[in-house]
Image (cartoon, rainbow, N blue to C red):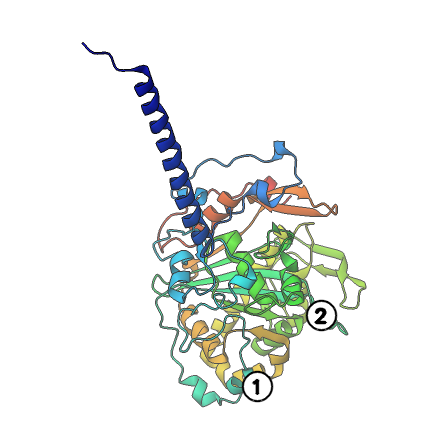
Amino acid sequence: MRRIPQWFVFAWVVVLAISSVGGAALAYNFVRERASELDEVLDLPELPQVGGLNPFAAESATETAAPQPGLDAERTPVAEVAGAASDANLDATLEVVDSAGAANDPAATPEPAEVAAALAPEAPGADAASEAGGETAAVESASLDAAALAQLQPWDDPRRVTVLLMGIDQREGEAGPFPTDTMILLSFDPAGKTAAVLTIPRDLWVEFPGLPEPGKINTAMIRGDQVNYPGGGGPALAMKTAERVLGVRVHYYVVINFEVFTEFVDAVGAVEVCPPEAIDDSQYPDGSYGTISIHFDAGCQDLDAERLLQYARTRHGNSDIDRSRRQQEVIMAVRDRVLSAGGVIALIPRAPALWESVQDNVRTNLSLQEIIRLALAAEGIAPDNIRQGQITFEDVLLQQSPQGEDILVPIATDIRLLVQDLFRPAGAPSQRPAPSSETAGS
């Protein structure tokens, strides 16, 4: 049998090696080109986690949360289409929790410069598309007479609609921008006849979409206005930040100061609250950078507008978690007062005048008509189907910022479970244990 020459075998080895290297190089170049093209369209940053939001914390404090059923998407964030993204694409990447209670992760938000056009998705129930950051021209709404407003029908879009309510700490003589004293998410599911109220603590440490430095969530309004954030400045940035933390779409915002609150309560009348224990606060802010002492007896009592504001704002109990419970109590008490006085329809005759008197102190992308339509639909929700929740100390890590401030670093999976539980269908039992008394009031 004739032997194969060694030089022939060696030549074939060389040819195969060169072919392999060349093929690998071609494949690498092809993949790299495709990846570069994809990077121009999609931005895929990591979803914020405990460690990512608190890079200066010790490694021992950063624990990996246990996998939770239904939250596998937490590990694989969805990308949001940048630049020329359409409303349909945005809705596909960041949908609201639906009436079945299944939470979708939010899309990671690209840089502001890339999404200036994409920050204005069409909101459920809007009769005509409007920019998310464009504040409503209240003059047209205020010019409507009460008879026209009385003909409005309740909100009839079946999709969930979510509003971020923000109260700013605006003091006499200040020109702004102002920090957010209160941040409450109000969500309404017209089809499922449920609603959710979630209070966000102002010391929550967050990453601001498109901005380099993290900070407390109550500074979102200030930072957004300072950089003229695309889509509406401070409110737009606050909405996007809340979306990133909570994992739900925020469609509307309403920013009010204390004057709006007191004028509205004056219009509806004294409101009953029931503090379980006496409240004494010797350091309550008086609005002029000073302090006064306030006191509330334990037990049910009717409060006028000024006293009700004090009750909602006092930090008695030494934590924003305690205060958030009182603020939700006030919201529900005001709702009960409106219903006992005849409901929204009874307020409509005074609505144009009230709106005109407060419009200089309100920033919102809702019209007066839309506010009334939402209120008409929401007042029909049974109290048992209005779920209230707070981000408590069980949902965060207590840390300090680089500047030495006390901050609350969110635990992403726990907060998403809280939201999913609040948005569950009517009649569905809660799957989330109640916060322990030690952590809830510490």
Residue closer to the observer: 113 or 314: 113
Q: Where residue 182 sits in the image (x, y, percent)? A: 62, 61
Image coordinates for residue 300, horizontal then vertical, percent: 60, 61
Instruction: Note whether 373 is above or below 328 in the view shown.
Output: below
The crowding category of the residue bearing disc 2, from other C-alpha atoms within 10 Å (few below 14, some 14 to 19, many at least 20), is few
Q: Please, is residue 212 above or below residue 227 in the view?
A: above
Callout 1: 10 Å neighbours few (<14), some, many (20+)? some
What residue is shown with label 2?
A: 176
Which residue is at a point 57% across and 42% down the rendered structure image? 50
> Whole-Å distance between the Cαs marked 2 and 1?
26 Å
Residue lying farthest left? 1
- Quadrant of the frame with the N terminus: top left
Instruction: Read off the residue under disc 1.
Output: 353
Judging depth in this view, the residue of 76 and 300 nearest the camera is 76
Residue at 34% of width from left, 64% of height from top? 191
Is residue 15 placed above or below 256 in the rendered structure?
Answer: above
Residue 313 location in percent, x, y? Answer: 67, 61
Q: Residue furthest top?
A: 1
Task: Give amino acid for label 2.
Answer: Gly
Residue situated in front as seen by the camera: 89 or 236: 89
Say which quadrant the C terminus sits in.
top right
Q: Residue 194, can we see it?
A: no
The three-letter amino acid code for the residue at tag 1 is: Ala
* Position of residue 139 measured from the top left corner of the image (x, y, whole percent): 55, 86
Q: Nearer the viewer, residue 3 or 345?
A: 3
Answer yes or no: do the residues labelled 2 and 1 have beta carbons within 8 Å?
no
Label annotation for residue 390? none
Callout 2 secondary element: loop
Residue 75 in the figure: left or right of residue 177: left
Residue at 46 percent across and 62 percent down: it is 187
